[in-house]
Image: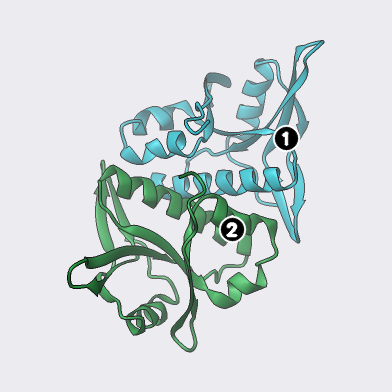
Chain colours: A cyan, B green
């Protein structure tokens, strides 16, 4: 199991403030012979008749020396986790959680278009205030 | 600039044996404020009237302690490089070069479906014989 992200607990608190209940920390899966640990699995009651909404989340603090190297790893994990979840027919919408500050600082970088093009859903959080600032659910452009 | 992959030179030799000429080693680009180094850019004459074919290649030896961690980084780089090339309108078909042995050993892992689903083109090489074993150009399933 890999080490917890630096902002793991801060993000978890932020998510709980949004009304989510953490089901698994981490979500442990086995894909073929490979053990996989996605940072969090959470659920929220939408409405009694519609049941619960369930999501999986990869948390990335982007605290490394290079933003782009952290981005490569975050994107690679997200893409592979999504394939793993689909292959297991484990129906969880996957989000990448990242500090709002890091997102804002790099918003103009062309490489950030990767999120939209690759349908990477985001949760932007404030690690100090421990709150979610924004949910970004990408629209499917290939319906 | 990041360190060269362990099999960089072996792969380069293999590629040249296939009739390709290396144009840039590495291919240096600037995306917004971020310097990006793709391992190789190569070209090959197809036919006088059709001009040259040009490609960019990320080489990954998968020599780290964890196959899956190496895979996350390879996939993340590939996806981000592809967006960067598109954003710059730098028309190069991007390939991920990896040892044939590593591919064969992990072929049954569900996570390897990532290559097909995400349209990641592959060059499988034998690092000892310094030859290309297989080119895998994914078919576009969203025409």
Q: Secondary structure at mark 1?
A: loop
Residue that extends furthest to the front in the rendered view of this protein: B49
Name the image quarter holding residue A132. top right
Left or right, residue B47 beside residue A20: left
Query: What's the residue at 63%, 73% (across, down)?
Result: B104
Q: Residues within 10 Å of mark 1 (few under 14, many from 20)?
A: few
Query: What's the residue at 69%, 20% (across, down)?
Result: A16
Query: What's the residue at 48%, 82% (across, down)?
Result: B127
Q: Residues within 10 Å of mark 2 (few under 14, many from 20)?
A: some
Instruction: Tell me: residue B128, above or below residue B15.
Output: below
Q: Do callouts 1 and 2 point to residues on the same chain?
A: no
| Residue A77 percent coordinates (x, y) | 57, 48
Residue A129 visible within the image? no
Per the image, the residue denoted by label 2 is: B69
Cα separation between marks 1 and 2: 23 Å
**Labelled disc at residue A1:** none
Instruction: Tell me: residue A127, above or below residue B85.
Output: above
| Residue A34 percent coordinates (x, y) | 72, 58
In this view of the protein, which residue sits in the foreground, A42 or B106? B106
In this view of the protein, which residue sits in the foreground, B104 or A112? B104
Instruction: Tell me: residue B100, above or below residue B36.
Output: below
Chain where mark 1 sits: A
Query: What's the residue at 77%, 14% (across, down)?
Result: A50
| Residue A17 percent coordinates (x, y) | 66, 16
Per the image, the residue denoted by label 1 is: A91
């Amino acid at each position: 199991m890999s080490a917890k992200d630096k902002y793991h607990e801060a993000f978890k608190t932020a998510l709980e403030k949004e009304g989510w209940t953490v089901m698994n920390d981490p979500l442990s899966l086995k894909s073929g012979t490979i053990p996989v640990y996605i940072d969090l699995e959470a659920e929220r009651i939408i409405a009694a008749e519609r049941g619960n909404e369930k999501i999986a989340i990869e948390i990335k603090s982007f605290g490394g020396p290079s933003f782009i190297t952290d981005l490569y790893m975050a994107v690679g994990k997200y893409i592979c986790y999504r394939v793993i979840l689909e292959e297991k027919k484990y129906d969880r919408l996957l989000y990448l959680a990242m500090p709002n500050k890091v997102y804002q600082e790099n918003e103009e970088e062309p490489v950030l278009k990767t999120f939209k093009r690759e349908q990477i859903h985001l949760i932007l959080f404030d690690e100090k205030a421990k709150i979610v600032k924004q949910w970004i659910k990408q629209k499917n452009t290939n319906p």
